[in-house]
Image (cartoon, coloured by chain):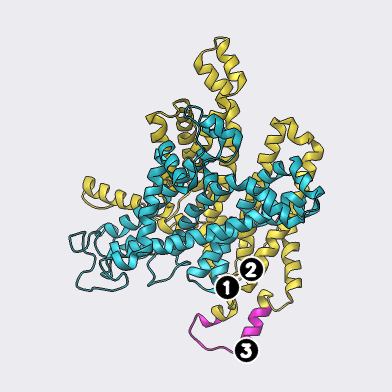
Chain colours: A cyan, B yellow
Amino acid sequence: MTDIATPTPSGTAAAFADDAYIPPRGFWNATIRFMRRQPVGMVGIVLVAIFGLAGIFADWITPYNPTANDFSAMTEAPSWAHWLGTDQLGRDILSRILFGARTAFLVGLTSALVGGLSGLVLGVGSAYFGGRIDLFLQRILDIVMSFPLIIMALAVVSIFGTGVQNVIIAITIPLIPRCARVVRSSALAIREIPYVDAARALGYGHSRIILAHMVPNVVAPFLVILTAFVGQAILAEAALSYLGLGVQEPVAAWGLMLQGGAEEYASTAPWIAIFPGLAIMLTVFGINLFGDALRDVLDPKMRER
Amino acid sequence: MHRYIVSRLLLVIPTLLGAAALVFILMRLIPGDICLVRLGSGGTSFSTQALNACHAEIGIDKPWLVQFGQFVWGLARGDFGLSMWSGKPVVQEIATRFPVSLEVALIATIIAIAIAIPLGTISALKQNTWIDLAVRSFSIAGIATPAFWLGIISILLVLDLTQAISGHPWMPSIDYVPIWKDPIRNLSIVMLPAITVGYRYAAVSMRMTRSAMLEVLREDYIRTARAKGLMEKIVINRHALKNALLPVVTVIGIEFAFLIGGLVVTEQVFNLNGIGRLMVLSVQNQDYTMTQALVMLVVTIAVLTNLAVDLLYAWLDPRIRLR
């Protein structure tokens, strides 16, 4: 993780010129340095941590069972018993939001990681091999990218059925070409640097050159886009679940909580619509704040500003 | 330049063909049968002959390769056939729903430009001040807010506000009227969806404006312009903004292309009968001809916007076309 604070030797000198330059050692030092340099990014980390921990520990911290109906307490306004009120089926909204965090992060992280890593391999491979392979791969990625996301998701869900797993597939596929694009353009520049030729002259195999010599050098743009993907995937999951194409009842998911009841009871029980949306917004807001800070730290050009 | 245009145009063909193949295969992988739905919707039983006759009528009894050939041949001639669901011409069905989607997209674009360029510029000029921080937070929030939630909340606000002012809640009607027939009613229908979509769109373009301005403001020619004593207003408007706008125009163009296809959720929230909803319906009904036509429409808009952006770049920057 030291890499995060010291991506390139040339960039660090300029960035820390006002400090006595001490390369941060270890994860904690890098984290502390990040906190000092990027207070806004820290706000992002805190927001993400709150919802992330809520998702992990939802089983222990939720006051109510998120799927239990209580017909004696339907559409109740926020109170001491139900901090964020109850929905039209008498389910505690706070409990459902906490469990919804688990769904959101599960879908967000898995889609971003799988989509990002596939895009990384395709992007670097495409740049490394070049020529016809590059041209062919770029056309395929062009097609997937111009294809409407919602049709892709609809088709995946119609073919395989709804549910968390298939939502992840539906969101992952369109992320792959977007990542491959960004990574490829960085990798094209790296390919021209003599050490890649040197590695080839030494007789190293393609996979070794790609994995050991090219991939580490595109890590900076890759991490930035990966962070953005997590936010986009969470938003996409919410939209699909809202349309009824994503996660299905009774699983708690933020988009699902906004479906049906939220609109119907909007004027009489606005808390049903307000809180799940706020949860989505704050989480993605936090992720984007963190992503911006990460970009500033990783990109020496941006740092000087 | 001519060679560049021709080579870029030729690359459009494989992309469109690939998208055609992709939607063709995806639609046929979905389990189910439109004829079963059509015949069974009345709740009556039907014979195998009726089912076969229905298959033959809409042409899905032929081998896939033949069907695909017919589809591509139709595309080449601009003939999209009849909707398998309603039996009406696909073009006619799309034409009745396209204006509302297009209008929402256009107004959203205008809103986005009106917000993004001034705010993005100010943010860059006042970098690292509280103004910059506020503008950046506003734009990051725009990217983080789900459009459909913003839609629900804005409906809620309109209901509450009208309730408070006039005593009874008011909602815009859902029957679309063209803007030239009844501008006020038309705008009352499309304004809220356009603002909802436009906020995110503005946020994306604002970030681009800011970073492009920051980049340009560090260029040598800006220092030169200031050094020769030009007024700051002229330096910003004529020297900086003009050069910073190119990537901003790109983002606006590409986002616009995605907007047409991305209106699905917003149309759902506001009960608008546009092409986004038609798309969802036609996939669910397994209406192959309609889905194929809609996907090709959206993909073509996306591909042509990309092409236009590339050509604009080449025209403005000779290094690209001479490479």
Q: Is residue A82 above or below residue B128?
A: below
Q: Which residue is mark 1?
A: A159
- Crowding around mark 1 (Cα neighbors within 10 Å: few <14, some 14 to 19, many 20+) is some
Report how far apart the C-alphas of labels 2 and 3 lie in the structure.
Answer: 26 Å
Which residue appears at 50% of the width and 87% of the height? B44
- Where residue B212 sits, quadrant-wise, is top right
Q: Chain of mark 1?
A: A
- Taking the image as shown, residue A303 lies to the left or right of residue A62, namely right
Which residue position holds label 2? B26
Q: Is B202 placed left or right of B307 in the picture?
A: left
Label 2 or label 3, whichever comes before in sequence order: 2
Q: Please determine whether, in this image, residue A120 is positioned above or below residue B231.
A: below
- Look at the image and say whether residue A189 sits in the magenta stretch: no
Vertical placement of residue A296 versus B32, above or below: above
Residue A234 pos. (x, y %): 46, 57
Q: Which residue is mark 3?
A: B48
Other residues around mark 3 within 10 Å, as few (<14) / some (14–19) / many (≥20): few
In contact (CB < 8 Å): disc 2 and disc 1: yes
Please provide the residue range marked out in magenta: B39-56
User: Which of B55/B198 is in front?
Assistant: B198
* Amino acid at the residue labelled 3: Thr
